[in-house]
Amino acid sequence: MSLLDVRDLALRFGAVTAFEGVSFDVRRGELFAVIGPNGAGKSSLFNALSRVYEPASGSVQLDGRDYLRLRPHQLAATGVARSFQNLGIFPHLTALENVLVGRHHLMRCGVLRDGLGLGRREERQHREAALDALAFVGLERCAGTEVQLLPYGLRKRVEVARCLAMEPRLMLLDEPVAGMNAAERAEIAELVGRLRTERDLTVLLVEHDMGMVMQVADRILVLDFGVPIALGTPAEIQADERVIRAYLGEAPEATRTEVRA
Amino acid sequence: MTEFLQLLFQGVSLGATYALVALGFAVVYRSSGVINFAQGAMLLLGAYATSWLAVDVGLAFGLAVLVAMVALALAGAGLHAVVLRRVTGQPTFVLVMITIGAGIAVTSGVEAAFGPDRRLLGDPWGSSSFEVGGVTINSVKAWGIAVTTVALAAYFAFDRYTRWGLAMQATAADEEATLSVGVPVRLVHAGTWAMAGGLATLGGLFLAGFPGAPQPTLGDAALRAFPAIVLGGLGSPVGAVVGGVLIGVTEVLTSGYAPDSLGTNFSAVAPYVAMIAILLVRPYGLFGVRPAERI
Amino acid sequence: MRGRAVLVAVVLAALVLPFQLGTSALTTATFVVIAAIGATGLNVLTGYAGQISLGHAFFLAVGAYTGAKLGADAGWSAALWIPAAGVVAGVCGALVGPVALRLTGLYLAIVTLALVFIGQHVFFNVESLTGGPQGRSFAPVVLGPFDFSAGQVLRVGSLEIDHNGLYYYLALALLAAATAFAWNVRRTRSGRAMVAVRERELAATVIGVDVRRVKIAAFTASAFLAGVSGALYASYLSFAQPGEWSLLLSIQFVAAVIVGGMGTVAGPLLGSAVVFALPTVLKNLPLVPDEAAGGVSVSDLSSIAYGLLIVAFLVLEPRGLVGLVHKPKEAHS
């Protein structure tokens, strides 16, 4: 049962084609990854899917409904949560407050009721949900710390917690391990894996790091120069000639020829 | 008809002055993203400096103007070096407020130093004028238009045809990249501010010309250049010029033709009303561009 | 624990202040507290939501003239015209809010600047409301049996409170309410949303924050408090001309918020104390020759000081006076 259905999507910037002919579907409860070498068009695809860019052609359906008519501010209400590569967290809010902003679209109080102190019960309920999300990513201890004081890896986790707190159907993760060392990457990989298993979420992630993707993804789409070149399970992708060539160039063939000679 | 032409001429000459101020502003914004709310104060300072040098110190007027321009250029570069460089990267709000603060300090400082009364500008034109087809042309204003045109042409030539102009554009587009190719970005910034200071002096000088005079309310008059800046679109030199002339003409024509129902002295707020009207339709001004946001 | 003790100490000190100060100092203190109400509003708009506004003087004026129309002209009780002043000003704020949506930082700054000038133009010309350039008188606060007019004295046991003290306590009560309101906002959904909009507007949008609503809410709340502050201010002054509601007044409020510490609880009061007591302090400094003696006018000196204070704090300590005292929340392990 596919949650997200992408057909023949293309994005152009003037005369430059970011990507075209992209078709894939993301099944419910699946962890789907989009990978590719630098400049492959993954980020552009991601931004098109998070409604920041407008595709030139093609269609996207979320649960059977036209997804492309959505504007960025409608994503949360539709059940789509996205993380940001350049960190979309709010530096001067605490970790808990950051996650609580994720609950914003689920809460009702306006400034008048808030100021008069009438929203206490709602606030308490959502605080619990936010703490729960923080606990899931292992950061309950940091709830009261301003995130600008947290190291990069922890900030990334706060952002995942916030996405989780939004109670989405579909989570879009933008290069979640970018700029991390091996230990941090392993932690995030484990976290992302648990999102799928423990919370039954559907996740689409765009990533550069092959190792992490092979470990957590159910299926993978590989882009190269804006064109999809392979779609399949990690095992299928790893064995795929075109993928190997895309990442490593012509070298494997040449080496084999040399050895024979 | 002659009355209309008369007002039109005055509007264009006022507009030319606003264009100078607005240009100084656009130049700084383009190269460093800083909104210089102190531009009006610099204008005031320029007019007073010229006046002081010409009248109190006794320099020849042309020399006084040049010295004032240099002094203002140094002041502009100084503001950048001492204050603004230390807050790069901070949110726009902070940069705006700092220039507002600097502007207030300077405007009040000038009034404190020179007192609230009108001064003599010390210019050679005074109240002299000549007639063209029934329209009285003040010499000061005529010179104002001429000098403004030359200054604007010089700026556009500089921007388009010289290396420094290119350096300024590059710095505006991508400071880090420009730095990495060996352009002395600090110097470029200093140069930009120096230009703003110089342009402010010229603007202030003509704004203070007959029938005006160097007086503290000049600061308020300078504030009316802001609608020009906004109307034209921040960071667009062409917009600055168009905006300046539009605002000047609007202001003068309203003073001549506005009905009484709009209140006395409506021309003083007409620029602001015009600005709001245009912003409602085009939120980034006539020539402004929506700034790109990084995701 | 320590915070609570400080709070109690401050409240006690504030309560006994009128009995410790002479009339002149009490007058200044009263103006400071009245201004702090307005500064609290601006703190919500600028400190929380990050919106630049040079238009605060306009909303103060709206509050003042609303109070005048309902209080002095129509004879309403202060219990009505003070809140009404806030409401009318708040509505004006709500109308400016949508304008802020389409305009980024500096455009907004200049448009709010325009608001002050256009407002003053209107005030100078609508004589029936404002008395024109000559100005008009404003009614003293009358709350039931309590008359705040000059010369009135309230006796409580052996204590005597004159009209300055009465205004002081009223302003203090309103400031406490305003501060509680602002503090509540910061700790809840709307406050978090404002900070989110200030820090990363695009991210906030994508997460589900209705940026439009947030900005309108911020402008409305800010204008409401400015209206209350303005109405009380004019009433205490008892007479004001349209020239009062100038760009300089707006800038004083901005300076107060910056100097005090943007987005903090104590900031508005601390900043108001510095900014609005400054002219009095300068006047009494023996070093400065006064205007009559050919020296510098107090108003010029004050303005220079405001400008320098704004620059100094933003460059050296952007977190204001509160920042000088506190460090940011440390990581608790």
Image (cartoon, coloured by chain):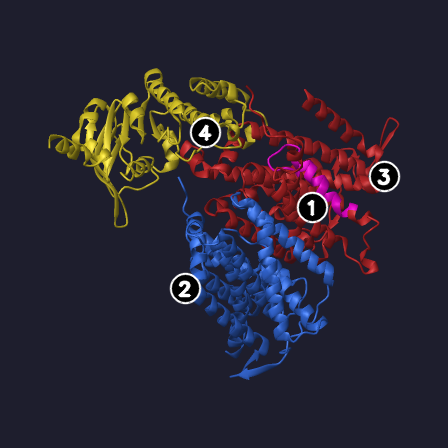
Chain colours: A yellow, B blue, C red
Quadrant of image for the C terminus of chain B: top left
Residue farthest toward the front in the current orientation of the protein: A261
Image coordinates of residue B53 in percent, x first then y, are 68, 70
- Callouts 4 and 2 on one subunit: no
Image coordinates of residue C197 in percent, x first then y, are 49, 37
Foreground mark, 1 or 2? Answer: 2
Which image quadrant for residue A32?
top left
- Callouts 1 and 2 on one subunit: no
Label drawn at residue C22: 3
Q: Dot 4 falls on which chain?
A: A
> What separation in Å lies between label 1 and label 2 (alpha carbons)?
58 Å
Q: Is residue C300 above or below residue A242?
A: below
Q: Is residue A62 above or below residue A15?
A: above
**Marked residue nearer the N-terminal end (1 or 3):** 3
Q: Dot 1 falls on which chain?
A: C
Q: Nearer the viewer, residue A86 or A123?
A: A86
The residue wearing badge 1 is C68
- Callouts 1 and 3 on one subunit: yes
Q: Nearer the viewer, residue C59 or B156?
A: B156
The residue wearing badge 4 is A152
> What separation in Å lies between label 1 and label 3 (alpha carbons)?
29 Å
Local crowd at mark 4 within 10 Å, few (<14), some, or many (≥20)? some
SS type, badge 3: loop
